[in-house]
Image (spheres, rainbow, N blue to C red):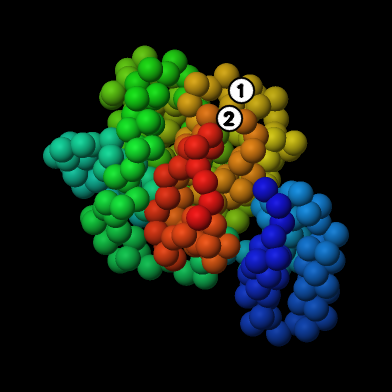
Amino acid sequence: MQLYCECMHCILEHHWSLVKDCTDEPRRAAFMREVCKTVAEADPNMAAPVPTAKLQKLYAKMFAAQDDYPRLKRKYNELLLSWLPELREKLAAANDPLKLAVWMAMAGNYIDFGVLKEVDDARLRAMLATPDERAVNTPELENLRREARAAKKLTYACDNCGEIVLDMLLMEELKRENPGLEITALVRGENVLNDATMEDAETVGIGRIAKIVGNGSNIGGTQREYLGEEAKRALMEADVVIAKGQGNFETMTGAGWNAYYLFLAKCPHYQKWFGMEHMSGQLVNERRFTRA
């Protein structure tokens, strides 16, 4: 995936939003100069999460006291875990638990502080309660069901904290339909934004149903060139890959894996790409999706 003009604008706008209220003008000016330089010098053939990872490290170094991502990660892991009993009851009562679990995992992609300035907890709860039938009633849902039932190995590329609790529910449903399925949960190798790491995945309990592997990188995605060997092997050996979020879609597209992408369209570029409304859900397969 390329670094599109819209992506460059988004990077600049996001990092300005982080420091616009800072009263230390020399420090915030120095930071924004580095942001502009990083975007200007970025490889045009690398997706936006690659330069963003460098800038996240810089922000954490220069504005450590203002870095709110650790608190947000804890908050949303704890919040979604508190909803877990109710969500499991809904799945148990559903006519098609896998379809509902796919929607819940997709809706959880709303918890993205790399794109959104804030997350409305009430809106998230409402999204989980009311599936978007247009997003999940697609041929790709049945393709995913069929391939996951026949698969021996599935690798699940996770995205954000809080969201990973809903990913865990989808993993549970996949295992229920195929008890012999070996699942590897791929998470970020280092802290970046509010993305999930090994510690987060272990905290919410994913280790009970999947092997947890860090991808060896602090990039908010799964960029092949930056992956550790264990992560590469997990993707290469998987019969099916599920990849959550725009960051994984941006960095994994074109890599050749049999990947099913689940995400919400949170930026104008992908709304145009797929002909989608803002915050609408998308389930597409690497080998079959087409642009609008």
Q: Position of residue 36 (x, y in %)?
A: 80, 69
Q: Amino acid at mark 1?
A: Met
Q: Secondary structure at mark 2?
A: loop
Q: Amino acid at mark 2?
A: Trp
Q: Position of residue 262 (x, y in %)?
A: 45, 45
Which label lies toward us, 1 or 2?
2
Front residue of this view, candidates 187 and 180: 180
Instruction: For residue 5, say whether it is visible.
Output: yes
Front residue of this view, candidates 170 and 280: 280
Q: Residues within 10 Å of mark 1 (few under 14, many from 20)?
A: some
Alpha carbon distance from label 1 to label 2: 7 Å
Name the residue: 35% across, 21% down: 149
| Horizontal side of residue 222 vs 162, given as left or right | right
- Res 163 label: none
Q: Does residue 239 lie above or below 133 as drawn?
A: above
Mark 1 sits on what residue? 236
**Quadrant of residue 41 in the image?**
bottom right
Q: Secondary structure at mark 1?
A: helix
Q: Does residue 151 lie above or below 57 as drawn?
A: above
Mark 2 sits on what residue? 257
Q: Residues within 10 Å of mark 2 (few under 14, many from 20)?
A: some
Name the residue: 33% across, 43% down: 138
| Horizontal side of residue 52 vs 42, given as left or right | left
Name the residue: 15% across, 38% down: 95
Name the residue: 40% across, 24% down: 147
Question: Which sits earlier in the primary sequence, circle 1 or circle 2?
Answer: 1
**Quadrant of residue 40 in the image?**
bottom right
Instruction: Tell me, yes or no, whether the two marked residues, 1 and 2, touch with CB atoms within 8 Å.
Output: yes
Instruction: For residue 172, say whether it is visible.
Output: no
| Horizontal side of residue 274 vs 46, given as left or right | left
Q: Does residue 38 lie above or below 173 as drawn?
A: below
